[in-house]
Image (tube, rainbow, N blue to C red):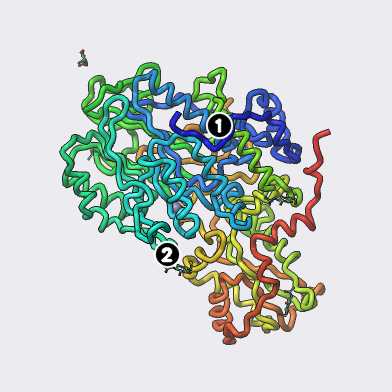
Amino acid sequence: MQLLSTIAAAVVGLSSVAMACDACTGEGDIELVRRVRLVHARMQPDAIPAVVGPKGPLPWGQLTVAHTSDTHGWLIGHVKEANYGADWGDYVSFIRHMRYKARSLGVDFLVLDSGDLHDGAGLSDATAKLPGGVNGQVSLPIFRNLDYDLLTIGNHELYVNDIAQDVFLNFAKFYGDRYLTSNVQIRDPADGKFKYIGRTHKYFTTHYGLRIMAFGILFDFTSNGNNSKIIMAKELVQQQWFQDALHQPQPIDVFLVLGHTSVRDPVTFPLVLEAIRKVHPNTPVQFFGGHSHNRDFKIYDRASTGLEPGRYCETLGWFAMSGINAGTGSRHPKGVPNPTRTARNTTISAGPPEYANPAENSTELVYARRFLDWNRLTFETHSDNVRQFDTPRGAAVSTKVGEERKRLNLTEAYGCSPQTYCRFCVKQDDPNSVYSLVQTALAATIINETRKDIPRMIFVNTGGIRFDLFKGAFTYDDSFIVAPFTNKFQYIPSVPYSMAKQVLDFLNSGAPQKRSLEREMRRSFLPRTVDACPLNGAQFTTAMRKRRVITRRQQVTTQGYVTSDDFGSDGDDTPHEAVPHFSTTNDIVAKGGFPADGKDPEVVDVVFYDFIQSYVLVALEKAGKKYSKNDVSYYLPPSYTSNDFLPDYARKFWTKDCLKPLP
Ligand SMILES: *[C@@H]1O[C@H](CO)[C@@H](O)[C@H](O)[C@H]1NC(C)=O
Ligand SMILES: *[C@@H]1O[C@H](CO)[C@@H](O)[C@H](O)[C@H]1NC(C)=O
Ligand SMILES: *[C@@H]1O[C@H](CO)[C@@H](O)[C@H](O)[C@H]1NC(C)=O
Ligand SMILES: *[C@@H]1O[C@H](CO)[C@@H](O)[C@H](O)[C@H]1NC(C)=O
Ligand SMILES: *[C@@H]1O[C@H](CO)[C@@H](O)[C@H](O)[C@H]1NC(C)=O
Ligand SMILES: [Zn+2]
Ligand SMILES: [Zn+2]
């Protein structure tokens, strides 16, 4: 075994991660299902099993790929969401079974990752809060238990110099020539010189004889820390090493281009494809993207398509192709669905059905793609319900994940949320919206004792909330998941209410607040924002207000991703009911200490995140009074941030009912 992990072989029983909160996750019926399945459910012990599994077996082709991207530290899995309950150990076991199956089908199988391993969950982020700690120092060694064939780097590896250096010194070294960073360099602390973090490219031959040229490319990212350097795509394609790789004398059967970039990005992949096509007009070029956090599949030309596998360990991307005129791999592996669709044009509305028999001996390239829900039921089903699903390594990883959750105090709960609050599934003023909760919590927690008798209006940006907040225990882990940023609370004292009441409208009619993002990203322990705007808004709302189970014509459907892409709308491995999507305004306001009689106050304290200070000053000026930075001071100590008020509220106002052990 090439990959010796840091994890000791000792496999401890599940009981070592006894969870305090079993009773408060999920609805009753789901709990029931869970007890039944617990017998062989590995996952994390408090995770909820999926109730609905895949629609059918996975397609396999001459070249088949499992693809992750934008895992952002979610190696624990989504313990509160049935659709995505698997942990990293379950995935490790699954890939082992898939490698075995590929060999028995006689096809090549590759496992790929497109980056963004940091920022988004407690397992990756909590270590940055420890003295001398770095984001990812616990999560990356766990991630490394997966024997990836090829990986590339994401922008979230490059905002903070310490993280970039950790990736260079540890992660890149570990994966060696499989970690591809074709356009990303770092200043080597040893000699001060800029070097590629991983390798620029890799030329290799697969088990069944496909000769592959692979690259790993980051989009034209410019907000990186000052110890790294990104070469823009248009420069990259002209570099001598890149041209040499295209013109090498050895044959190339397939190009694999991993990229931390959306498959819809008009720059990166199109430029790379154009450069390849000048030298190799007909060779298959397969792109594996990321960064936009979408499930997506795009057709570039008849020999080139791109897959994007979503985010946060919610989705595993699956890709299969046949018709490559090389190698000895089976073009029509038996007993499984095979890829059938050509990449002829981008307006396919009614392509051949997914399971149609492929035209025998077709010389055309044919493709299939699938987006798998990241849960134990998915993984077991596609492993043909093998009797012993957990491999020793997979089981050890699940155990390790559980131990680290506990050691980092991620399961420590502040209180029990009485209900689920979502970001987009209802209007933002609905009582079930997380923004209603944020307003209530801000009003109850953001109080300066010496000014508590002066009414206050607290302005915050909606983008600071990153995820839905689920019913049940609200934990330290959730504090990173829901509100990871560390905005400080500032204020301008005693502003005439006639002006203050106009501020919100001015804030919301302005441009989205991204201007100072880049500066902020370097300063805080966590970046302000995760990646580009979603391209398909509706897809982005994965989480559920209620874990609703809809029964229809004997079929059970849960809410979740409903994907449509260049191959149509049958890509989801488990079909879902769409989650409603409502957009939000830039900012919201919470009001505290207003007169009980409902009368307007004379003056109010205008409180806001330091992050939106400049916007608030502009809004006040539009409302009729010019204030400057000199009028701004801290309303609460700068150590109290936007990462603190929800835990604070939960501790003070929510019950501890859900924390009681089961009777
Ligand atoms: C990089 O930025 C840090 C502050 O973030 C600064 O201390 C350091 O001097 C900078 N290094 C270079 C080489 O510019
Ligand atoms: C594109 O695909 C559609 C549906 O398969 C087909 O009707 C149409 O002729 C194709 N167009 C081209 C230019 O190949
Ligand atoms: C497909 O190819 C095989 C092997 O070359 C040949 O035996 C078979 O007759 C071909 N089938 C068709 C439908 O052409
Ligand atoms: C976890 O919490 C305990 C008790 O509050 C504390 O002693 C310990 O230092 C914490 N560990 C970490 C890694 O934060
Ligand atoms: C409350 O506001 C006053 C006046 O700005 C400030 O001096 C004091 O430090 C604030 N209190 C806290 C706890 O931050
Ligand atoms: Zn990302
Ligand atoms: Zn990204």
Q: Secondary structure at mark 2?
A: loop
Instruction: Tell me the amino acid under the disc marked 1.
Output: Asp
Q: Nearer the viewer, residue 390 or 298?
A: 390
Query: Farthest front residue?
Result: 191
Quadrant of ligand 5: it is bottom right
Residue found 30% across the figure and 40% down from its top: 202
Q: Nearer the viewer, residue 428 or 98?
A: 98
- Of the numbered discs 2 and 1, the one sitting upstream in the chain is 1
Distance between the alpha carbons at the discs numbered 2 and 1: 37 Å
Q: Residues within 10 Å of mark 2 (few under 14, many from 20)?
A: few
- Say above or below: 522 vs 256: below
Query: On the image, numbered disc 2 is attached to which residue?
Result: 226
Q: Secondary structure at mark 1?
A: helix
Residue found 39% across the figure and 49% down from its top: 260
Query: Farthest right residue?
Result: 663
Query: On the image, numbered disc 1 is attached to which residue?
Result: 90
Q: Is residue 77 visible?
A: yes
Residue found 36% across the figure and 54% down from its top: 184
Q: Is residue 29 visible?
A: no
Q: Is mark 1 within 8 Å of ligand 6?
A: no
Q: Is residue 9 left or right of residue 190?
A: right
Instruction: Tell me the amino acid under the disc marked 2.
Output: Asn
Depth check, mark 2 against mark 1: the one in front is 2
Residue 553: x, y in percent?
57, 27
Residue 647: x, y in percent?
71, 56
Q: Is residue 414 left or right of residue 207?
A: right
